[in-house]
Image (tube, rainbow, N blue to C red):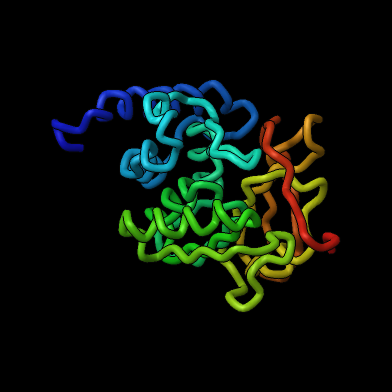
């Protein structure tokens, strides 16, 4: 980080808060600390570039921020946790459902080989695509569409992240997860109990599901009935 970066101190403080939150929630997550790869990605992405202009002053506060259309940019700690739970090494093909402003996709771009991200709200998706290109995230592709359907032309994926809450895991996403892959997804109804859930597909195709942490996400919207 450059010394003349006006957000440098706020960013450093946020990283410390994320590390503390990781310790505080280790009972549920099993992770007392996140990998250097994850934390380096959190440090590298300019969060202030992904919030509304009027929210720039609170961009590095450890809480969600509204981005319009009833959507939010997730709490930084949750972004770090979900990223870390995928156990990426830097070469994987990752699918993200719920682009929003593009912040989570930008973080993933630092820890994966390719990122494919889907946003159902057209104006958000187009704005995120423009923002990511302007910031140089060349390994991220954005599509406007229904996340319940996934991105079958690019499947299978080594990892899948869902950043809005369906009531149950979409079958299309399970099908598009490569054997040996991991999916992190919040499950539950809007304004009700939701659980961050880890889905692991074994090499023989068997799927195991593990509850990670109580969370609160916006609902996952679909244009067609979920299958």
Percent of width and height locating residue 94:
53, 62
Percent of width and height locating residue 193:
79, 30
Q: Is residue 172 above or below residue 103?
A: below
Q: Nearer the viewer, residue 178 or 155?
A: 155
Percent of width and height locating residue 187:
76, 43
Give the total of numbered labels: 0
**Quadrant hosting residue 196:** top right
Q: Residue at 72%, 48% (x, y): give it.
A: 220
Screen quadrant of the C terminus:
bottom right
Q: Nearer the viewer, residue 82 or 210?
A: 82
Screen quadrant of the N terminus:
top left
Q: Residue at 37%, 25% (x, y): give it.
A: 57
Q: Is residue 90 above or below residue 190?
A: below
Q: Residue at 43%, 29% (x, y): give it.
A: 54
Q: Residue at 67%, 36% (x, y): give it.
A: 217
Residue at the farthest left position: 3
**Quadrant hosting residue 213:** top right
């Amino acid at each position: 980080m450059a010394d003349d970066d006006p957000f440098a101190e706020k960013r450093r403080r946020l990283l410390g808060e994320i590390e503390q939150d990781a310790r505080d929630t280790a009972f549920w997550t099993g992770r007392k600390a996140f990998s250097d790869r994850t934390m380096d990605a959190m440090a590298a992405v300019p969060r202030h570039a992904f919030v509304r202009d009027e929210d720039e002053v609170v961009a590095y506060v450890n809480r969600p921020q509204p981005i319009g259309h009833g959507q939010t940019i997730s709490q930084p700690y949750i972004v770090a946790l979900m990223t870390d739970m995928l156990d990426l090494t830097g070469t994987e093909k990752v699918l993200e459902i719920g682009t929003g402003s593009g912040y989570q996709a930008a973080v993933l771009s630092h820890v994966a080989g390719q990122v494919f991200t889907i946003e159902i709200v057209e104006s958000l998706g187009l704005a995120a695509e423009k923002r990511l290109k302007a910031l140089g995230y060349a390994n991220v592709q954005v599509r406007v569409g229904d996340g319940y359907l996934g991105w079958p032309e690019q499947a299978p994926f080594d990892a899948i992240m869902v950043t809005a809450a369906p009531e149950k895991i979409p079958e299309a996403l399970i099908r598009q997860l490569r054997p040996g892959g991991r999916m992190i997804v919040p499950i539950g109804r809007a304004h009700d109990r939701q659980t961050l859930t880890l889905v692991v597909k074994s090499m023989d195709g068997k799927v195991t599901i593990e509850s990670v942490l109580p969370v609160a996400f916006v609902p996952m919207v679909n244009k067609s009935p979920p299958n």
